[in-house]
Image (spheres, grey):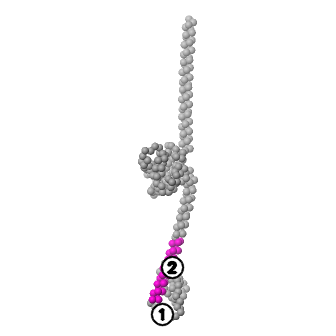
């Protein structure tokens, strides 16, 4: 005689809560095991309890396998999602690194989330300074101590002033009056974000500033040339007048001597 340990199939694929015993082999059930008996006689209470316990443990084992499979599936989906995010981040980084503007993004705690290659070049940041998680205050302190803001007696005061300027509600913009450590003139645009973060765009305006410098130099050169010309003409006029007076005096003296 064979006793089958059976777990009914769930049409909805839901949780299987337990099993039962049968003397006939089931056709549409999940079989966890069986007990074969060669002598037909009634089960004792202890045997029934043992078989029931075994059936419950088998149900738990099956449920654990199902949960494990679901967890493995969820873990694989999460890994795939992370891989997609990483690929998207890499594509975004590639796009940003090939822009002519410098881009830096800070989170709501004003810690660096990403920075592109052009901004690293503009500001001459080192990887040890401009790394994910670095504070905007750390970057400003690095610049202040390097002398980017001129002579500074109180570094922390300058750091706080610069941070407040960047975080002005509604955004802020200004042009650097002198070259950065990278030798460029930059225009800075700061845009506070709705989540509390900060986006900063650094635009290279060196060609524009160099044209302005060239025009200013040409203007100064023209003014200097005009001044030199005026000085020369005034000198020549003075010397000509003096010579005329000398000649007139000599002629007058000669005429007087003749008489």
**Left or right relative to 225: residue 165:** left
Q: Which residue is mark 2?
A: 62
Residue at image point 55% right, 28% down: 228
Residue 175 vs 130, above or below: the answer is above
Q: Which residue is mark 1?
A: 42
Our reading of the magenta stretch's main secondary structure is helix
Residue 31 spot, x, y in % from top left? 53, 84
| Label total for image | 2
Residue 161 seen in this snapshot: no
Residue at image point 54% right, 29% down: 227
Residue 193 vs 43, above or below: the answer is above
Residue 162 vs 227, above or below: the answer is below
Q: Residues within 10 Å of mark 2 (few under 14, many from 20)?
A: some
Residue 90 vs 166, above or below: the answer is below
**N-term mark: 2 or 1:** 1
Residue 95 spot, x, y in % from top left? 57, 55
Of residue 62 and residue 173, the one placed in the foreground of this image is 62
Q: Residues within 10 Å of mark 1 (few under 14, many from 20)?
A: few
Q: Which residues are magenta?
A: 46-73
Q: Quadrant of residue 242?
A: top right
Residue 209 seen in this snapshot: yes
Please say if the residues under marks 2 and 1 sit with CB atoms less than 8 Å apart: no
Image quarter in which the C terminus is found: top right
Residue at image point 43% right, 47% down: 155
Q: Which mark is residue 129?
A: none
Determine the secondary structure under disc 1: loop
Q: Is residue 51 magenta?
A: yes
Q: Is residue 33 magenta?
A: no
Q: CA distance from mark 2 to mark 1?
A: 29 Å
Residue 45 spot, x, y in % from top left? 44, 90
Residue at image point 47% right, 56% down: 111
């Amino acid at each position: 005689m064979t006793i089958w340990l059976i777990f009914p199939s769930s049409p909805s694929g839901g949780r299987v809560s337990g099993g039962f015993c049968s003397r006939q082999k089931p056709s549409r059930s999940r079989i966890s095991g069986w007990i074969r008996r060669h002598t037909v006689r009634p089960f004792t209470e202890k045997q029934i309890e043992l078989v029931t316990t075994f059936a419950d443990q088998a149900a738990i084992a099956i449920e654990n396998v199902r949960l494990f499979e679901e967890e493995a599936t969820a873990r694989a989906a999460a890994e795939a999602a992370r891989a997609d995010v990483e690929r998207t981040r890499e594509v975004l980084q590639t796009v940003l690194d090939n822009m002519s503007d410098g881009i830096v993004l800070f989170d709501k705690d004003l810690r660096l989330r990403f920075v592109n290659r052009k901004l690293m070049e503009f500001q001459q940041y080192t990887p040890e300074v401009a790394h994910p998680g670095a504070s905007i205050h750390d970057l400003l302190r690095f610049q202040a101590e390097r002398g980017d803001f001129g002579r500074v007696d109180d570094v922390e005061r300058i750091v706080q002033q610069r941070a407040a300027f960047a975080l002005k509600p509604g955004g802020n913009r200004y042009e650097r009056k002198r070259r950065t450590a990278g030798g460029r003139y930059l225009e800075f645009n700061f845009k506070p974000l709705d989540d509390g973060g900060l986006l900063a765009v650094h635009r290279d305006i060196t060609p524009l500033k160099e044209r302005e410098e060239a025009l200013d130099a040409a203007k100064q050169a023209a003014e200097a040339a005009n001044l030199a010309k005026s000085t020369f003409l005034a000198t020549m006029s003075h010397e000509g007048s003096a010579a005329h007076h000398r000649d007139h005096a000599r002629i007058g003296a000669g005429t007087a001597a003749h008489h």
